Amino acid sequence: MVANQDAKAAQAPVIETDNTAAVKAAIVSSEATKAAPVTHPLGPLTGEEISKGADLVRSVWPEGTKLQFKVNTLHEPEKKILAPWLAAERAGEKPAPLERKSFIVYTLRGTHNVHEAVVNLTTQKVEFNAKLGPFEHPNSDMAELEEVEKAVLEIPEVKAEIEKLGLPEGAVVVMDPWIYGADGIKEDKFFDDKRVMQCNLYLRDPKNSSEEDSCHYSFPLPVSPVIDPATLELVRIDIMPTGHDETIKPFTWQDRPANEYIPEAHTMRTDLKPLQVVQPEGASFTVEPFSELGRTLKWQKWDFKVGFNQREGMVLYDVHYDNRPLFYRLSLSDMAIPYGDPRNPFHRKCAFDLGDVGAGLTANNLQLGCDCLGSIYYISSVLGNAEGKPVDAPNVVCIHEQDSGLLWKHTNYRTNRAVVVRNRELVLQSILTVSNYEYILAFIFNQAGDITYEVRATGILSTQPLDLDLTEVPHPFGTVVHPGVLGGYHQHFFSLRVDPMIGGHGNQIAYEEAEAMPRDPKLNPNGHGYMVKKTVIDTTGGYDLDPSKNRTFKILNPSVKNTVNKLPVGYKVHVPPFQPILADKDSYHYKRAEFADRSFYVTKYVDGELFAGGKYTNQSHGGKGVRSWAERKEDLTKEQDPVLWVNFGINHIPRVEDFPVMPMEMLKVMLRPVNFFDKNPALDVPSSKQSFNCSTALNTADELAKKVDGLAVTGGEMKGCCKA
């Protein structure tokens, strides 16, 4: 997470083509800087830096003041300083070290007083420290979630409501704390300028209540306490409707079956034989540290830096292909999951998993041979906890190669010679567990210059209680996935932030559309002709796909031309179409999820504008995210430093097959070169050969002696296939 307190007033930086002046300007001559150890400006905070930042923040408060740290992460240098610094580093120079800074969000324990600070770790000074205003709430932290979970079930009023349910003897109640969302409703002394949590209660299988991994989502309960996470005081208890409308009625427990996902609850298949990814000579990529926790990755002409932080998780910097610049910074900027049940309290359900908790904070410790296959390199990190102390985050990114079918092939039918090249990919993967859901997130690179961002959604539905006698009756707001269990309709939205430098800085965003030509007796006598029209986006705003026109968005560099056709070099964006957010424009869901209504937003670069939903999403009211930035209608023609926000998602109408755990659903965004190279960049990838791949033919000897599609087959290899 990166903040710039002057972001609103800041002007987009001019990236100089001559780096000399800017690099000189980046040199900090203070004695403190000279004495500091040389640390890369993009290196994730070390454990020592996390502790030092927290100590410096404590030092501005009276001794004994108890603070709870929410964010303690790298404050990245301004682009106008960092971009030329990186260019100088890549050129083999040794630019002077930049000051190291951290961005810290914290609360005064037991209160709703929230502050943010910028700490200069080099000079050991707190440069900025201010209290946040209303409706700017911090994210949750793991210590807080554990405290809330423990406290709620000990509150007498909550115990009394649970007692009314008539649960079986020995029943074990499980609680999921949820971000409250927002509805703008003032109720008694409560208004959502105060941060609270909505707690969902469930039951372990009463017949097996000692099983800690029991799928408690199979037994949702209608009692939903609202708690103040700062004081751990009960605000109120919401009772959920369990029918088809908003009616609240008494709920009495009735016996129902369990629905488990753990393997010991099932008879496993026995006919699955091992499939192993073997690389006898090791991996084809190299990894080198550029800082204590940052890594430089090189593979098949690609090279880039990998960072990791509490909010975004994995971040890629300074992405190059064959020493040609492509992207300054790439990251998943935001996620929003609004639910569509209009009844209280479900109408508030809208999770922003990155801003409300954090992709880094919820990242899994990835397991060899389970989450990642083959020859794996793991990246670990360090994050700050609620006490301001460093906590190890082991194996949060796995890096490996995979085969993804064919990259290209051609067979000369005259000679029957086939030239075949397989699509080897480099995968960088993280997995988040956010309460019930898992998100498998990956950057994937191939040998033809493509970058794919892949999201796989899995995990368990956030379930709601339902009257047992309504199990076989269609529900207006969800799908019945198990007796007494409703999977509510909801949408998943993702925003990929693309800060480009295709062919260098000074890019522009454009879209092209295919248009049918009118019939003309000379130019188009048969009515078959069509042409392509390009529109350069010269003003910030939101834009949509239009499949009927093959509308394709491109990032172009007008000052760098293709050597063959003299068109601007560029990359195009392939993004799946999605149904925009269904909540209306006056709703809080719509106001808060500022990236959920358009496939693309284009903004002018401003330091600190990193998160599509805004810096603070917890109970936000909107107006501080990408839609608001785009509505500034800024000119993009002068300084040419745009940021492209690529938005995509799914409308999840649950199936019975999604329960008790959901088979993954996959979404992909591809960044693909267009007129960037002078020919297919994968022509030099070695052809696929049996001697290299060592595949096994399962056919019998008699079958192999026959002909396949008219080609002689000998020893499992078709004549003419895979020849040099």
Image: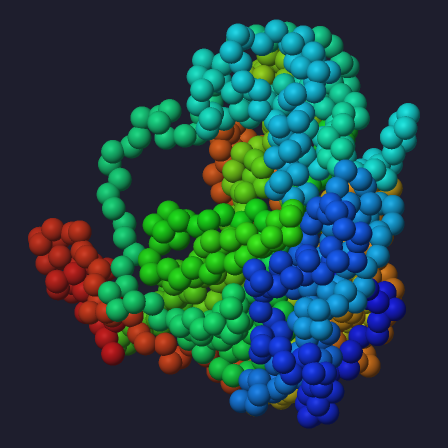
Q: Residue at x 25, y 46 (%)?
A: 274
Residue 177, given in percent of the width and then of the height, sits at 65, 32
Which quadrant of the view contains residue 565? bottom right
Residue 120 visible (yes or no): yes
Location of the C terminus (image quadrant): bottom left
Residue 598 visible (yes or no): no
* 52 or 479, nearer to the observer: 52
Q: Residue at x 59, y 49 (%)?
A: 361
Q: Residue at x 53, y 89 (%)?
A: 92
Q: Is residue 48 above or below residue 555?
A: above
* 422 or 39, nearer to the observer: 39
Q: Hey, which residue is sitting farthest front in the picture?
A: 63
Left or right of 129 in this view: 509: left
Q: Residue at x 73, y 30 (%)?
A: 232
* 460 or 493, nearer to the observer: 460
Count every numbered label the image shows and give the total: 0
Which quadrant of the view contains residue 626? bottom right
Residue 407, given in percent of the width and then of the height, sits at 40, 68
Q: Is residue 527 above or below residue 140?
A: below
Residue 612, given in percent of the width and then of the height, sits at 73, 56
Q: Is residue 77 above or below residue 346?
A: below
Q: Is residue 77 above or below residue 170?
A: below
Left or right of 645 in this view: 374: left
* 455 or 226, nearer to the observer: 226
Left or right of 167 in this view: 273: left
Location of the N terminus (image quadrant): bottom right
Residue 182, given in percent of the width and then of the height, sits at 80, 38
Colour convention: rainbow
